[in-house]
Image (tube, rainbow, N blue to C red):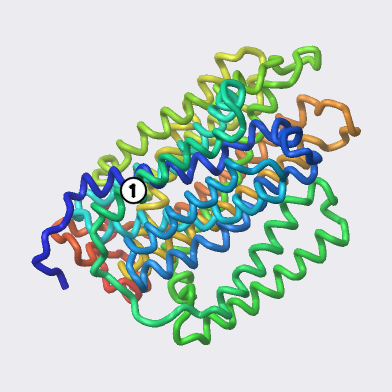
Amino acid sequence: MKTTEKRTNYQVTFAVLAIGVLAYALLQSLVIPVMPTLEAALHSTQTNVTWVLTAYLLSASISTPIVGRLGDMRGKKRMFVFALLALALGSLIAALATSLMVMVIGRVIQGIGGGVIPLAFGIIRDEFPGEKVPGAVGIIAALTAVGAGIGTVLGGPIVDALSYHWLFWFPLILTLIAAVGAFLYVPESEVRTQGKVNWLAALLLSAWLIALLLAVSKSSTWGWGSSKVLGLFAVAAVAVILWILVETKSVNPLVDMKMMRVRAVWTTNLVAFLFGMAMYSTFAFLPALIQTPSSAGYGFSASITESGFMLLPSSITMFVMGMLTGRMAERFGSKRILIVGSLITMGSLATFAFAHDSKWELYLASAIFGVGFGMAFAAISNLIVAAVPPEQTGVASGMNANIRTIGGSIGAALMASVVAAGVLPGELPEESGYTNGFLLMTVAIGASVLVALFIPAIVRNKTTHHEPHVELRHPEMAAVAGGTVVGDEPE
């Protein structure tokens, strides 16, 4: 029930959430273009320095749904501040690190900050007027991708102008501003779920995520058919089965399996997985394509900084579309926006596959890529937020972010295998490797279009504020979220 307590203006709340999410998103990718620099500065090897990225990825994957669940139970503001403080502490450790071990410890602590994404969605749903929710969720969703893109652009210039330490000092400043702002201005949510954390489920969730992501991230080094990779896949398979059994029988599940079986949830999660494949692959391999010496018969001999700027148009258009998609969804429906965004993304990926003659072609494709992704990311987040009851927003959004990350890890590993197929150590990939890799991602997004057709459409009730504000079209969704089944008209 609502209280008469004066609430902070939702626009102030949104500004604080945006700063926190942007800081987290930057830390996802700032290190990607400067891994060789970190290798030398930390006196490491090419293989070992990848733990700077892998440790962060694993920690965030484990922490995101757990912190989201704790926010649903204990208070979203409280856990949002906690996640930001963890992000700040990890950034401080990483900024001061002069050895790989210390850097990895800092990155593991930073990963706890992954909870800011589902918590931000939950706070928006609880605190914003119903008609403002789609737009706000769309912008926050776009910021997660925009921040990752900008991080790839800024990593090189920051290291060139200052040092690798500033890859973490700048996000630390943003994080502390967000933490103080959240403590002072973000109201605590009145929507709570009962129960306690099922730590056995959390342990099993961690086990299969670690096994799966470690196998995928190391597949290019160990080989897909190596005993280590196959063994980790086996561990992941057993752990995920046990996890589902424990969650199904639990009185207090960490992730409600009934919720995960709802058609609007599992179809949207599958789309998020496929988009994760394409996004991570593009961010990792488009700069590599641009950096290839022109003597190879393709490529542009670009510097790290110049190749990073190739992603700047996509970051700009992603943010713009994130701002516009909320209004578009009100008129056309998030499902339709997702389908159109997927089709646009397919066109940009096909261009990346074949247009290797002029830089302007890739800059244009990058801008179109951002349009498609901006529309799709906003739609995916809105569909998840609207498909579950308010008290499950955190854990549902957390699992959606996790599934996108898993897709990204698998997509990047598959892309690496395709690009490097038949290439001997020390040799440059053939141009056909990039063509085939981006075509594979085009097919993945094409599959997302087919999946999106099965997502039920959702109608929002614009008249409420803190109370649940969705009406759902399908009986299974109504049973979970307490919504009303309506006709099959546009949203």
Query: What residue lies at 48% left-to-right and 35% top-to-bottom?
Result: 170
Figure check: 43 above or below 68: above
Q: Are there few (<14), some (14-19), or many (20+) residues within 10 Å of tag 1?
A: many
Q: Position of residue 436 (x, y in %)?
A: 72, 34
Could you say which is closer to the camera, residue 433 or residue 350? 433
Query: What residue lies at 64% left-to-right and 54% top-to-bottom?
Result: 105
| Residue extending farthest right | 424
Could you say which is closer to the camera, residue 276 or residue 187? 187
Quarter of the picture containing the N terminus is: bottom left
Q: Position of residue 298 (x, y in %)?
A: 74, 17
* Residue 162 shows in this picture: yes
Q: Tell me the quarter of the picture where residue 311 sits.
A: top right
Q: Position of residue 445 (x, y in %)?
A: 56, 43
Q: Is residue 249 left or right of residue 31?
A: left
Kindly identify the amino acid type of the residue bearing the numbered disc 1: Leu
Figure check: 489 above or below 241: above
Query: What residue lies at 42% left-to-right and 54% top-to-bottom?
Result: 116
Q: Tell me the quarter of the picture where residue 425 sits.
A: top right
Q: Position of residue 203 (x, y in %)?
A: 61, 74
Figure check: 380 above or below 160: below
Q: Callout 1: helix, strand or loop?
A: helix
Image mark count: 1
Q: Is residue 473 left or right of residue 109?
A: left
Q: Which residue is mark 1?
A: 17
| Residue extending farthest left | 4
* Residue 410 shows in this picture: no
Q: Is residue 58 left or right of residue 489?
A: right
Query: What residue lies at 56% left-to-right and 35% top-to-bottom?
Result: 167
